[in-house]
Amino acid sequence: MTVDGDKDLEGQIAEWRAYVQRRRELHHTDAEELEDHLRSRITELTEAGLQADESFLIAVKRMGSLDELSREFAREHSERLWKQLVLPGAPDASAAARSRRELPVMVLCAAVAALAIKVPSWFGLDLSEDDAGFYARNVSLFALPALAAYFAWQRRVGPRVIGVLASLFVLGAVAANAYPLADDSQTFVLTAIHLPIALWLVVGVAYVGGDWRSGRRRMDFIRFTGEWLIYFALIGLGGGVLMAFTAGTFRAIGIDAEGFLESWLLPCGAMGAVIVSAWLVEAKQSVIENMAPVLTRVFTPLFTATLLAFLVAVIWTNNGIDVERDVLILFDLLLVVVLGLLLYAISARDLAARSGLFDRLQFALVVSALVIDVLVLAAITGRITEWGFSPNRTAALGENVILLTNLAWSAWLFLGFVRGRTPFARLERWQTRYLMVYAVWAWAVVLVFPLVFDFA
């Protein structure tokens, strides 16, 4: 084995070890035991004449997926697992120290986010219809900086990354408030939609510890996003029940609590839930099966059937797609959901496994979405030809071109994979790299569109 081969192998083992160590039900000694086992297998394979990288891949494959290993360890150490789920500080001293540090920091960040949304009221901007435009533009600036700060602390990022994060949040705040955007203008709506997307990807930079070039770390952030959405939705449902019970019980004794609920509990709770949801994902990801890939398995067949039925209806009726704004938003959301289903299926898949029925089902889903995107683009192009460019139509055109590019290349890579000619890893790399395209587009809509269209 060459010196370069040794370095590459050590780098691969280091990456594997880092992934193993993120599984909190595996103690440090467990990870060392797994690594020794892996190295022994690699040695056997290299002595048999294989190259270092081939030996590494085969050894990992023979050991089984990491989730399977984690479940095996969990079964053998069930008492430890459940103590960790209920009492995070129980397993060992280092884990206890980490939990003791993370919990108060999370609570502090959640409190900052919760109180941030009340700061504008000190300057006469209340949560009312008159000031609804201000809150619509700035809603992502109340909680996401605190979330980025939490991850920056957790990942121990350096001053350079902190400076980049702070600069991007300041830029977003300036774009949301310095431009003279009327509440009824199209650029106002576009800013309110795209600024949270742009700033969420800034949070992603903090989540990956500034290592945005790493495809694996970007995929980790994609996984986190899906799980965060689920936890946030669950907390939101629980919060709705809490508010209903609070209003009802206080009404029973003659006290009207609706003002407090609307002015304090709802906005502050929503902002705090952004941080709490992130903490729950991080704290429980190693002891609870990820939910996003499970839901992907359930909804992929349903969405595939729905899109195919829609295409059949279009052909049967020969009706075109209405290109009103609400309809365009609906179709764009549909295409985003399709990409989300694709991403979360990729995130939970064994990259070395062969294609199966579910992969073919996903291929059909991607192709159906691609055809629908072409129909939407044709409708948008016709509307622009007839009425000219406007902020909404231009944004719709750009977003559908971006989605079309992603879907088209994804379909091509999926076809190659199903036919056994393309490794699945290429599809994963394509999706994670494409995040930069979404980031650039979101910032362009926020920063450039108002200027180009004269804040219309």
Image (cartoon, helix red, strand yellow):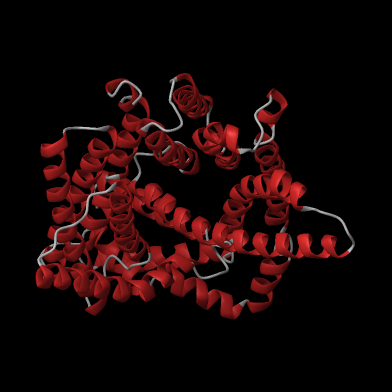
Picture layout, residue 122 above or below residue 267: above
Rendering coords of residue 230 (x, y %): 51, 61
Single out the residue that lies furthest toward the right. 253
Rendering coords of residue 1 (x, y %): 24, 53
> In the figure, is residue 82 to the left or right of 388?
right
How many numbered marks have been drawn onto this rendered protein structure? 0
Which residue occupies the foreground of this view, 58 or 137?
Answer: 137
Which residue occupies the foreground of this view, 191 or 285?
Answer: 191
> In the figure, is residue 157 to the left or right of 255?
left
Rendering coords of residue 43 (x, y %): 33, 64
Residue located at (71% from left, 59% from top): 243
Rendering coords of residue 135 (x, y %): 56, 35
Residue 88 showing in the rendered view: no
Picture layout, residue 302 above or below residue 389: below
Picture layout, residue 273 above or below residue 173: below
> In the figure, is residue 273 to the left or right of 456?
right
Residue located at (53% from left, 25% from top): 159
Which residue occupies the foreground of this view, 301 or 253?
Answer: 253
Residue 272 showing in the rendered view: yes
Which residue occupies the foreground of this view, 24 or 225?
Answer: 225
Residue located at (68% from left, 41% from top): 114
Picture layout, residue 167 above or below residue 323: above
> In the figure, is residue 240 to the left or right of 87?
left
Residue located at (58% from left, 68% from top): 287
Looking at the figure, which quarter contains the C terminus? Answer: top left
